[in-house]
Image (spheres, grey):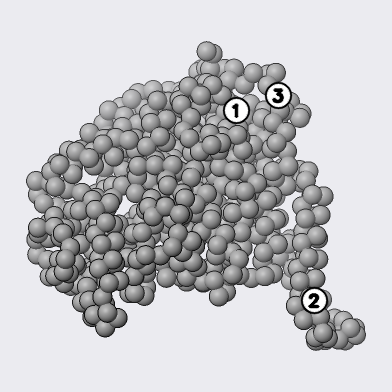
Amino acid sequence: MSAATPFPANEPRDHALDACFLGPYGENDALLEKLLVEFLRDHVYWRRNFHPEDPPAIGTAAAHHPDYLAFESRMRRELHQLSAQLKKSVPFHSPRYIGHMASDLLLPGLAAQMLTLPYNPNNVSEDAAPVTVDLEVQAGLQLARMLGYPHDPAQPACAFGHLTSGGTLANYQALRLALALKAFPVALRAAQAPDLALPADDWAAFNLPQAETIALLEAWQGWLAAQSPAERKRWIARVERERIEQRGLVGFFAAHPALTVPKVLVPITAHYSWSKGAKLLGLGRNQLELLPTAGMRLDADALRDTLARFARERQSVLMAVAVLGGTEYGTIDPIDAVLAARTASRRTGLDFAVHVDAAWGGYLATLFRREDGSLRSRDEVAADYVAFPTPAVHAAFAALGDTDSVTVDPHKLGYLPYGSGTFVCRDHRAMALLAERADYVFHGEAAGDYLTRYRSLGQYIPEGSKSGAAAAAVYVTHKVLPLDHAHFGRLPRATVRAAEAFHAGAQRLALELADCAHVLVPFAPDSNLVCLALNPAGNTHAERANAFVRTLHDELRSDPTHPLQLKEFFGSVTSLRPDLLGPAETARILGALGLDPATLGEGGADRLLILRHTLMNPYLLDRENGISYIDRYFGFLARRVRALVGNAAVAA
Ligand SMILES: *Cc1c(COP(=O)(O)O)cnc(C)c1O
């Protein structure tokens, strides 16, 4: 198939998307206004109906008092100033914005959040949020279903998910939970917990597969439940004293000299939140083991070699992280291969958690889900695209359900307001180990108790007080747009198709500019993030190529000192580092760009700047007006490249 025609011209427009957003032009203003007024009134009636016999505490004449009027005018003045300043904001809503991971907001989420705000629920616990705590737990189950985790709370091994301020905190929560699970069997041994089939030594205890640790935890809870209250209290205290959460890393590892502080294996493409997490947990950044990639996707051979070495050295491993949609290049790691490497590693006695950082790509999983929750075959998915999904990408999504935990950001590809990341773990029973209160005896709960337990959400999450409005936004959005290919999936479908059109457009641009510049898509996009490397023809110096891309990017970045309207398009920039790329990939990319390898790395520029485009806006291909903002962008880029190359030629 020709790469130039990924979009059949006669394809019917997807009207289901028309009511999703406020719209680039504010097209749905009347709809949003209607919703806001309706639910503001509804909220006011709720206040009045609480105790209608209570008279208004603010007198009906109060609004005429000079102090009232003075306050109102000050408030208006400041709000007008704020509103005026906000006009310098980045126009995420526009199809001319293809920069960072942001776009328009889904109306159901925006409206749900705005309508919930005046009720001000605090999801730290049900006392402060009788409604929205449940919605948060339900939203976790909605995401669990999307990921292929067990999501029936009546089943003991149901998944659990909760919101965080963002992906950074969700990744941190993954580290916390993995460490709690890893260290718990060691604590049980140290406390000589009776009547349990405990591992033979500390090394085996520290390398117990999560499922076995959870079984051990269940058995322990069962044993405790059968004791008298006094005995139970004594035994809980005895085990608590040995836990890593009580002793801290220093005390714990001093007490268990056979164990080393565990490593966290992340690909070099990993987000810097992993560095923050390692510091926050006290592991230290030295414990982050950066794994090489091939084409910016985690290199499974290198992972296997590293695991074999660690098994030989008895270096323990906390978790291996696979990235589903890398922040810089949008690439998708081979999650299936990471799971296979763990299976192999288990045979050598080295076990660890597998976490997927899907902060960016998580919602792409909707493309792979049928409405009944089952997995779509690659052929089924591929029918909508030119090349997506590659067999490797399909295999990665198909393997999600076998991982231990996942980070997904509703405030990225979920098109929701900031303040909503999520952490989802496959088996909720592990969460008992994170509880702040040590009375983790949930044994023998009835099925309905799943929701009851998590109403004390503050017990389990890294944060304390948190927004119930954000939870309402996520839950309502998932109800309006269920997380399968026929509903929510239409959004990522539009963006992946846009990315394919963008990739084809980049290839056309390369031909068009062949006389004056090298243009290269360095990695075939796995999803909806596409990078572009550029170098003026005849230039062999990486430093000059960087200056060229920097000048281009200056025209594509937000600049609060100039009117927004002067910007034609918004893009972002990232870089390629030869030390991370490896020699083969570096040679391939520099060769295609006509750059001298000696000018990058040792003694030269330490990295190569490239343009980065996040294709989230569903109106990049505007069928109403027959406009392709992608074609317009490439037209703009061609003009700018020619002008810059021409100027350089004149200057030289
Ligand atoms: C954005 C991102 C994060 C961090 O998420 P925040 O919501 O910004 O805290 C982590 N990992 C990946 C892969 C991301 O894209």
Amino acid type shown at disc 3: Pro
**Lateral position of residue 306 relative to residue 221, left or right:** left
Coordinates of residue 491 in the picture (x, y in percent): 60, 37
Q: Label 3's element?
A: loop
Front label number (3 vs 1): 3
Q: Label 2's element?
A: helix
Asked if disc 1 and disc 2 are in contact, CB closer than 8 Å, the reply is no
Q: Residue at x 70, y 62 (%)?
A: 115
- Cα distance in 3D space between marks 1 and 2: 57 Å
Q: Residue at x 26, y 31 (%)?
A: 583
Would you name the residue on which mark 3 appears?
A: 12
Would you name the residue on which mark 2 appears?
A: 48
Coordinates of residue 365 in the picture (x, y in percent): 48, 38
Amino acid type shown at disc 2: Arg
Coordinates of residue 109 in the picture (x, y in percent): 64, 53
Amino acid type shown at disc 1: Phe
Q: Residues within 10 Å of mark 1 (few under 14, many from 20)?
A: some
**N-terminal of the two: label 2 or label 3?**
3
Would you name the residue on which mark 1 appears?
A: 634
**Lateral position of residue 82 relative to residue 297, left or right:** right
Looking at this view, is 366 or 421 the one in front? 366
